[in-house]
Amino acid sequence: MPLLTFVLMGAMGDRRGWNDDELRQAVNSSVSWRAVARALGLKDTSAATPRRHAARLELDTSHFTGQRRWSDQQLREAVAVSSCWADVIVALGIVDNGAERVRVKGHAVRLRLDCSHLRSPHAKSAPDEVFDEPVRPEMLRYSAAALAMAWFTLRGCPVALPIEPQEYDLLVTTSKGIQRVQVKSCASRNRRGYWDVGIGRRPYTLDKTAGKMPYDPDSIDLFFIVLGDGGIYVIPSSVLAGRTSISADSYNQYRVGDASSLLGGAPAAADAPRRASKYAGEFVGSRFRLDPKRFAFDVYSGGQAV
């Protein structure tokens, strides 16, 4: 009977279809291990062997970003020159939201970077320091819900958040009962100078390119819309039924307030009239008719928010 002979792979020679020089070139020109595998003529999922040999050769992979838009080296440089995590986020050129901040922090920990100098942005400021960060229009979509909650709360209308994802963003108890409110925003005018506000929703599908569809008017009672100039609109869903976008300029009768100073807009005159749309009276009942100015949500540089 023939004897089975086990031979070490090293004794049979290197069976790779690529050599160390080709691996070096692939690593230098790629931003992920999947890209390295493709450059070597391998499947995307066959990066284990290139990674092992790259470790043997001690190749520099700090420029790899993978699914990120920033590399390890960019993170190292951002952490070194920043004084807080907000500065790090800005240096990396990404939106400062909860998910991205946690991702950046986690990656910094994995890289064992010294982050002890990144003091909390909530640390007590020196007496002569003033918060003067500029308004970032792209953050309006994240703050619109908070503005809506403040608007209704100032009118004595309790606000609740759904504990599970729903078609509405807020539940508001008004003089007409509980209203389901969908919050929308528009940060800037279009090329023609109009405020085009998207009020549709994307179907529940994995395809992010799917067109938007209108909300079911039986699922939403009100739309709360805030514009980049501070304009606040509250529009019944019955008025917008079947639409996926509107020009806010056509719905001025539903404009109920102005928060332009919060958004860094041109301040209104201190003696500007504080008027509220008559439509606002539907939320607060008889209190509005007794003193309509009391319930205006206008913010002026020379006065107080009421």
Image (cartoon, helix red, strand yellow):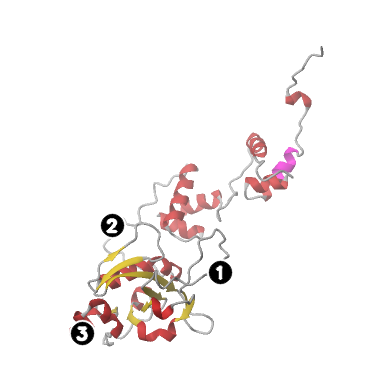
For the N terminus, which image quadrant? top right
- Indicate the position of residue 45 as horizontal and vertical percent values: 65, 43
Provide the secondary structure element on which disc 3 rests: helix
Give the residue number, with chain letter if any, for mark 3.
289
The residue lying furthest to the front in this view is 218
The residue lying furthest to the left in this view is 290
In this rendering, position of residue 80 left or right of residue 207: left
Label 2 CA crowd tier, 10 Å (few <14, some 14–19, many 20+): few
Q: Can you tell which of label 2 and label 3 is closer to the viewer?
A: 3
Q: Earlier in the sequence, mark 2 or mark 1?
A: 2
The range drawn in magenta is 19-25
- Indicate the position of residue 53 as horizontal and vertical percent values: 67, 36
Give the residue number, with chain letter if any, for mark 1.
211
Give the residue number, with chain letter if any, for mark 2.
124
Q: CA distance from mark 2 to mark 1?
A: 47 Å
Label 3 CA crowd tier, 10 Å (few <14, some 14–19, many 20+): few
For the C terminus, which image quadrant? bottom left
Task: Determine the main secondary structure of the stretch shown in magenta.
Answer: helix
| The quadrant where residue 178 appears | bottom left
Label 1 CA crowd tier, 10 Å (few <14, some 14–19, many 20+): few
| Residue nearer the viewer, 292 or 63 | 292
Provide the secondary structure element on which disc 1 rests: loop
Q: Earlier in the sequence, mark 1 or mark 3?
A: 1
Q: Amino acid at mark 3?
A: Arg
Q: Is residue 247 above or below residue 55?
A: below
Provide the secondary structure element on which disc 2 rests: loop
